[in-house]
Amino acid sequence: MKGAPKTFYIRTYGCQMNQLDSEIIIGSLEAMGLRRVCTECEGDILIFNTCAVRDLAERKVMGKIGQIGRSKKKSIIGVMGCVAMAKKGKLFHKLPNIDFVIGTNNISDLEMVLKLVIETGEKQIKTDDKFEENLNYLVANREDKYKAYVSIIRGCNKFCTYCVVPHTRGREVSRLPQDIEEECRALADRGYKELCLLGQNVNSYGKDKPEWRELFHDLLYRLDKINGIERIRFMTSHPTDITIDLMQAVRDLSSLCEFIHFPLQAGADRLLKKMNRIYTKEEYFRKVVLLKEIIPRVSLGTDIIVGFPTETDEEFGETLQAFRDIRYSVAFLYTFSPRKGTAAMRWGDTVPAEVKERRLQQLMALHREISGEEYRATLGQSMEVLVEGYNKEGLLKGRTRCWKKVVFAGPPSLIGTLQMVTPHSIHHQTLIGNRVSIPCTHTSPSVV
C-alpha cells in the first residue's frame, strides 16, 4: 500500500478468549496511533482473529478472507488466532493475498510484524508454540463499559480427543496472581462491576506453578477483596479440577456468582473415555451432588457434543437422561465436528449427519422444556440484575447472577447499576419484570 496505514478493521470469531485477545489487539493498535473503523472498505489494515474449534467456522472465515483478499489488496491483510496457529505458513498458500500470520501466543509481536510488513513489503509469520507471559493486558480497549473479561490462564493440558485447543493455544501457562489483581483493581477503578475470569481450563489455575502456592480458589479469595467489583464469574471449567475448596469459595464469597459452567460433553462412560474426559459419569454426578449440597442455589451450565464417532442411540439416550436428571440452566449443544490434528479425526465422522441433527434437536427440545419450567418458577421472585443497556424495544436489559436475561422499564441512569427486579412474564428465553425499590444483597433468598 502507498503511505503509512492510518486505520484498521478487525473481525473476531469464536470464544470469549478470542474476544479478549481482540480487545488487546485493538488497544495496541490504537496506542500505535491507528484509528479503528467499522467496515472492511475503510481499513488500511484488515485483521481477522480466527477460531478453529469447529470446521464450519473455519471454512467461513477462510472463505471471507479469500473473498476480501481478491477485492481489497490495497490493504494489509493479517490472520491471527487459532486458525493461524493450526495452519501456520500453509495459510500463505491457501490465501496468497494475506500479508502476515500471527498465532495466539504472539499477540505482543503485532507491532513488530506490522512494521516489517510496511518496511519490507514481505510476508511475515510469528507462531510460537509456547506462550511467554509478556502480554500487556492493561492496554485492552474494552467493548463493554461494565463487564470485562480477564485472562488468568492460557492453553490446556487435557487433550480431549475432539479438541484442537492444546494444539492452537499450547500448554497451560498461569498469569502471576499479582498481575491479575492489578488488572482487576484497574478495572474496578474504571467502574467495572462484573469480571469474567477466562481460561480454557480456568480451574486448573496455578497447577503449573506449584511454587506460587496459589490455586484457583486462592485467587478468588484475593479478588473478592477488591472494592467495586460486584460480581465475579469464571469459565470454562473441567469437572476433574472442580474441588471442594472451589465450591466453598463460591458459597462464601459475596462477589462469586452462583453459576458454574460444568461441561458434561457426553452421558455414557464409553464415550467419555473415548473423548479422554478423565472422569466417569458416576464421578461427575458425585460432584453435581456436592455442588448442590454446598451451594444450594447453584445453577449449572454444560457443553454437550452429539454424534461423537461410534455414538449409539442407547448412549445418546444416556446423555438425554443425564441432562434430564441434572437439569442444566445453560447449555451449549453441538454436533461433532472432526478437526485435523485431533485423535478423534482418525475415527472418522461415523454418525450420519441426519442422525446427528435429529439427536441435536431432541436435546435442544429437552433444554427448552427444562428452561421453560425453570423460568416459570422464577415469576414473582425478586432477583438481582446488572443493567447493561437498552434493548430494541426500549426496555432496560441485564442478567441475573445465574445468567438469566431480564428486561424491565426504567431510566438510563440505572445502566451500570445493580437493581432488584421481579419478573411477571416470559418471552422466549427472557424474563420481563418490574423494578423493585429494595437494596440489592447477594444473600437474597432468590439468587437466580
Image: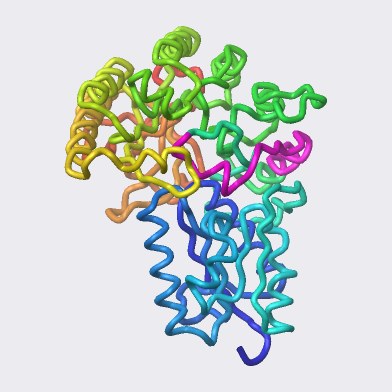
**Residue 333 is inside the magenta segment:** no
- Specify whether residue 15 is in view: yes
Please identify the quarter of the rendering in which residue 410 is found.
Answer: top left
Q: Residue at x 37, y 62 (%)?
A: 60
The answer to which of 265 and 431 lies nearer the viewer is: 265
The C terminus, quarter of image: top left
Numbered label tally: 0
The answer to which of 357 and 441 lies nearer the viewer is: 357
Whole-percent x, y for residue 349 in the image = 31, 42
- Identity of the residue furthest to the right in this view: 211
- Identity of the residue furthest to the front in this view: 346
Q: Residue at x 41, y 33 (%)?
A: 403
Above or below: residue 171 compared with residue 131: above
The answer to which of 59 and 431 lies nearer the viewer is: 59
Please identify the quarter of the rendering in which residue 226 is found.
Answer: top right
**Segment colored magenta:** 161-185
Colour scheme of the picture: rainbow
Please identify the quarter of the rendering in which residue 337 is found.
Answer: top left
- Specify whether residue 231 is in view: no
Whole-percent x, y for residue 188 in the image = 66, 42
Q: Is residue 129 left or right of residue 75?
A: right
Q: Residue at x 43, y 51 (%)?
A: 412
**Residue 179 is inside the magenta segment:** yes
Whole-percent x, y for residue 169 in the image = 60, 47
The N terminus, quarter of image: bottom right
The answer to which of 45 and 405 lies nearer the viewer is: 45
Whole-percent x, y for residue 262 in the image = 45, 25
